[in-house]
Image (cartoon, grey):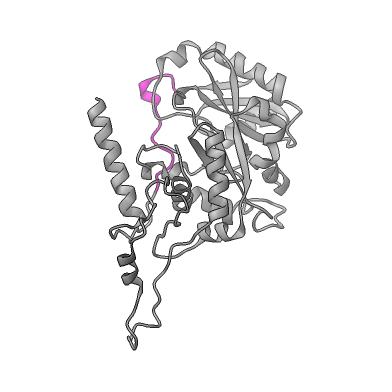
Amino acid sequence: MKQEEVICCQIQEWYPKFKSLSLKTAILELPESFIEYLAGDSDTFLLPTSVSNEDAFPNRIHKPEDEEDYQLAEGSEDESEQPLLPPSFPELELKIKESIELLGGAVFPKLNWSSPKDTAWISPTGTLKCTSFSDIALLLRSSDSVVHDLCHAFDSCSDKTLCRPHHFYLALRKWYPALRPEMEFRCFVRGQQLVGISQREVTAYYPAVLERKDNLKDLIHDFFLDNIEGRFKSENYTFDIYVTKDRRVKLIDFNPWCEFTLPLLFTWEELEQIGRSGEDVDFRIVESQNTVRPGLKTAVPYDYIDMSSGSGWDQFLRKADEELQQQMRSS
């Protein structure tokens, strides 16, 4: 894998060309101070303070009496041990708030390459749905996938000269609550030819997808020929798509052709062989309950320490409890 192939798959590189085929997205360049916050290795997880009273769980309510926790008496032996104060990114927060409003009030975030799917469990909704800067900061700061973008994006490149991108971007993508996971597919392109298509949700069996297998294969192949072939810079890459109820295909993402992109129902060896042999496009889905795959990534939570009253985690847990109570009342 070449460094240029990885660079081409950054969302700020491909989205302008394929905007009409993809999800509505706002892309913001991130300040270096926020990157340092995301990559920080502090044992204490501090969520940023907010400039907006409409913010979600880390909206720490300012009370004069709380400041006593940060004040030390004169002559105290602990004067040298200053408490960690939460960071603040007011300009970025306001840009994010404006973008969320323009995109309908809810988004899911990603950096140059990766979304924080490994931390969806931490959200009160169990998804990547974000309605505030706080939601976004929590998911990004907790994600191993994001750490890969920050520190290891070029590690597998044979011609590596970069340790990290020159600039990092936050892509805020419009949230669509009714998306069906069984209708998302990963497509594999080798030598500018589509060689394989795999169902992305491999942990469940969907009979309706099996019934439409041949039609879906033709639909996705035609989409590639009409919209992708020859337009993307790399020779070898993958792209993810979503098929809507009315048979429209939406482009979700591009990824490099390499080991840190999951091949799902294939192996990389199989895909290489199909590409060399010139065989027809191989379309694979979960065709029975017996072929369901286990989850391919398990998130490992950080050691969360700041659980005091009024902290970000205290507010988060309250929000999660309120969400649960509301769901119980609705049902």
The span shown in magenta is 286-299
- Where residue 258 sits in the image (x, y, percent)? 61, 42
Residue at the image point whose x is 43% and y is 19% from the top: 287
* Quarter of image, res 123: top left
Q: Quadrant of the N terminus?
A: top right
Residue nearest the observer in this picture, 307 or 147: 307
Residue at the image point whose x is 42% and y is 49% from the top: 53
Residue at the image point whose x is 36% and y is 37% from the top: 125
Q: Quadrant of the C terminus?
A: top left
Secondary structure of the magenta portion, mostly?
loop
Residue at the image point whose x is 34% and y is 89% from the top: 75
Residue 107 in the figure: left or right of residue 7: left
Q: Is residue 321 magenta?
A: no
Residue nearest the observer in this picture, 94 or 107: 94
Residue nearest the observer in this picture, 114 or 109: 109
Q: Is residue 293 magenta?
A: yes
Q: Is residue 214 above or below residue 197?
A: above
Residue 23 in the figure: left or right of residue 7: left
- Where residue 133 sits in the image (x, y, percent)? 48, 47
Residue found at the far front of this picture:
64
- Where residue 160 sits in the image (x, y, percent)? 70, 55
